[in-house]
Amino acid sequence: MTAKQTNPWAELSEIMKKQAKQYSKFLNLLTKKEKALIDGDMNKLTKIIKEEKEYIHELELTENKRVEAVKECLPEQGGAPTLKEVLAAVPPEEKDTLEKNAVGLMESLNKVAVANRSNAELIKEAMNFVNYNVNLLSSDRTLDNLYEGTGRMKGSEPKVRGLINKEV
């Protein structure tokens, strides 16, 4: 028998510990991304996004392992049990370690969520700035002027024209 078959709870705990470390590394990457967004360094940002995709793939693989480990720990449970249900079913000798690793994982996830929200806000603001500049550069400058060259306000002349001046 392998260690996996003898103690699935210990394996689940190790997977959660590994996930917490992976999310901490991912958080470092998100911090670099935030700095690149602030600096407007598109080359660095492109490189970071490529790295980010690789991290996400690794995180997905580890998450799948964690889900399988939970199923192995709770084979009678249908669907995906919640963390609360997992902690309620853990044997007493594994409970402290599993709780510690679960808390570490949740803390890492919360930090990543905060960094993601911050980066999303920076991207949104950058897009607003780009849209403003595009509108500024593409607008008809003559419509923005309130005064004519004579000093009169545009549109202050009488709207009524004589029959001769009327365009056909």
Image: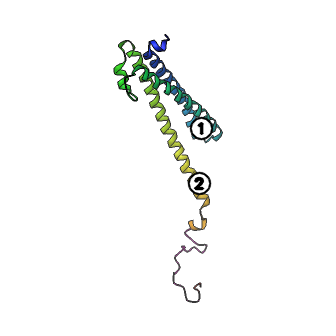
Whole-angstrom CA distance, mark 2 to mark 1, is: 20 Å
Most foreground residue, 138 or 20: 20
Position of residue 5 relative to residue 154, above or below, is: above
- Lateral position of residue 134 relative to residue 79, left or right: right
Q: Earlier in the sequence, mark 2 or mark 1?
A: 1
Most foreground residue, 24 or 14: 14
Position of residue 58 relative to residue 145, above or below, is: above
Which portion, as a residue range, is magenta?
145-164
The residue at 48%/21% (across/down) is 15
Tell me the number on the disc at residue 36: 1
The residue at 48%/12% (across/down) is 3
Task: Indicate the position of residue 16 as horizontal and vertical percent values.
Answer: 46, 22
Tell me the number on the disc at residue 151: none
Task: Indicate the position of residue 42 as horizontal and vertical percent values.
Answer: 63, 41
- Residue sticking out furthest to the top: 1
Q: Is residue 146 magenta?
A: yes
The image quadrant of residue 132 is: bottom right
Kindly identify the amino acid type of the residue bearing the numbered disc 2: Asn
The residue at 55%/46% (across/down) is 126
Quarter of the image with the C terminus is bottom right
Q: Residues within 10 Å of mark 1 (few under 14, many from 20)?
A: some
> Which residue has dot 2 on it?
133
Q: Is residue 47 magenta?
A: no
> Dominant secondary structure of the magenta stretch?
loop
Kindly identify the amino acid type of the residue bearing the numbered disc 1: Ala
Task: Indicate the position of residue 92 as horizontal and vertical percent values.
Answer: 35, 13
Q: Residues within 10 Å of mark 2 (few under 14, many from 20)?
A: few
